[in-house]
Image (cartoon, rainbow, N blue to C red):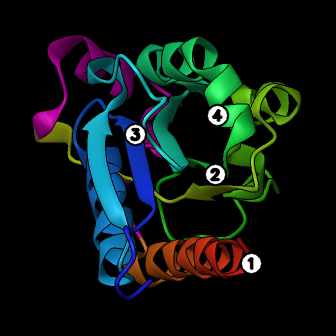
């Protein structure tokens, strides 16, 4: 990429309390260190995605769904996303366990419904689920009420469970793939 214009990558995210934004910013930093021209922006602020060469789109997951802003972004920009390298991520599972008490895999079973839906729509090069973070004192009153309901409280481990090394490795893989694609062109 030396002497050439770097690929322009949009890392778009939808975050309610900041944990997913933190993941998006970390992905952006990793891609930037690899020489890519990266813009990190909230999905709701991006009106036109046509000026980018590649995309990483992520959202917090609530009840197995991406946040509305991320869904609208992908659906509004599906044609351009399908024509360029695109990766999707989700964040949300809390705790450090690989397997929940009910026997379900903590990350694999936390994928949002949109991953399957967007497979045919935008043909992502990869999808992944990252662990999230939860700070009871930062949540809204309505969410705090829900979090303290019996049964829900047991699922809401408090703390920051984001695995930065896993996030960095995923972003590095994206950079490797983009670099290889650019070398071929």
Distance between mark 4 and mark 3 Cα atoms:
12 Å
Distance between mark 4 and mark 2 Cα atoms:
9 Å
Q: Position of residue 29 (x, y in %)?
A: 28, 71
Q: Residue 139's quadrant in the figure?
A: top left
Find the residue positioned furthest to the left.
137
What residue is shown at x 28% (from left), y 29% (from top)? 16
Q: Up-down: is 35 above or below 43?
A: below
Q: Which residue is tagged 1?
A: 184
Taking the image as shown, residue 143 lies to the left or right of residue 122, namely: left
Q: Which residue is tagged 4?
A: 81
Distance between mark 1 and mark 2 Cα atoms:
20 Å
What residue is shown at x 50% (from left), y 72% (from top)? 171
User: Which one is earlier in the sequence, the residue at label 4 or at label 2?
Assistant: 4
Q: Which residue is tagged 2?
A: 87
Distance between mark 2 and mark 3 Cα atoms:
11 Å
Please give the label number shown on residue 35: none
User: Which one is earlier in the sequence, the residue at label 2 or at label 3?
Assistant: 3
Asked whether the viewer can see residue 91, the reply is no
Q: Residues within 10 Å of mark 3 (few under 14, many from 20)?
A: many
Indicate yes or no whether the magenta region holds residue 157: yes
Please tell me whether mark 1 or mark 4 is closer to you in this view. 1
Distance between mark 1 and mark 3 Cα atoms:
26 Å
User: Which one is earlier in the sequence, the residue at label 1 or at label 2?
Assistant: 2
User: Which one is earlier in the sequence, the residue at label 1 or at label 3?
Assistant: 3
Q: Position of residue 166 (x, y in %)?
A: 52, 79
What residue is shown at x 57% (from left), y 20% (from top)? 77
Q: Position of residue 20 (x, y in %)?
A: 35, 47
Give the magenta-colored segment's residue range. 138-162
Q: Which residue is tagged 3?
A: 12
- Which structural element holds mark 3? strand
Taking the image as shown, residue 152 lies to the left or right of residue 8, namely: right
């Amino acid at each position: 990429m030396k002497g050439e214009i770097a690929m322009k990558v949009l890392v778009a995210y939808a975050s309610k309390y900041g944990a997913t934004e933190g993941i998006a910013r970390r992905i952006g930093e990793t891609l930037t260190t690899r020489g890519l021209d990266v813009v990190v922006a909230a999905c709701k602020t991006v009106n036109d995605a046509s000026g980018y060469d590649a995309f990483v789109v992520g959202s917090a997951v609530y009840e197995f769904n991406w946040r509305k802003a991320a869904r609208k972004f992908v659906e509004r920009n599906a044609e351009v996303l399908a024509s360029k390298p695109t990766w999707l991520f989700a964040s949300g599972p809390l705790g450090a366990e690989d397997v929940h008490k009910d026997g379900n895999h903590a990350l694999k079973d936390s994928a949002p419904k949109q991953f399957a839906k967007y497979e045919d729509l935008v043909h992502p090069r990869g999808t992944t689920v990252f662990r999230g973070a939860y700070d009871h004192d930062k949540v809204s009153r309505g969410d705090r009420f829900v979090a303290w309901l019996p049964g829900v409280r047991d699922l809401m481990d408090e703390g920051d469970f984001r695995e930065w090394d896993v996030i960095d490795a995923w972003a590095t893989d994206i950079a490797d793939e983009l670099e290889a694609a650019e070398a071929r062109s």
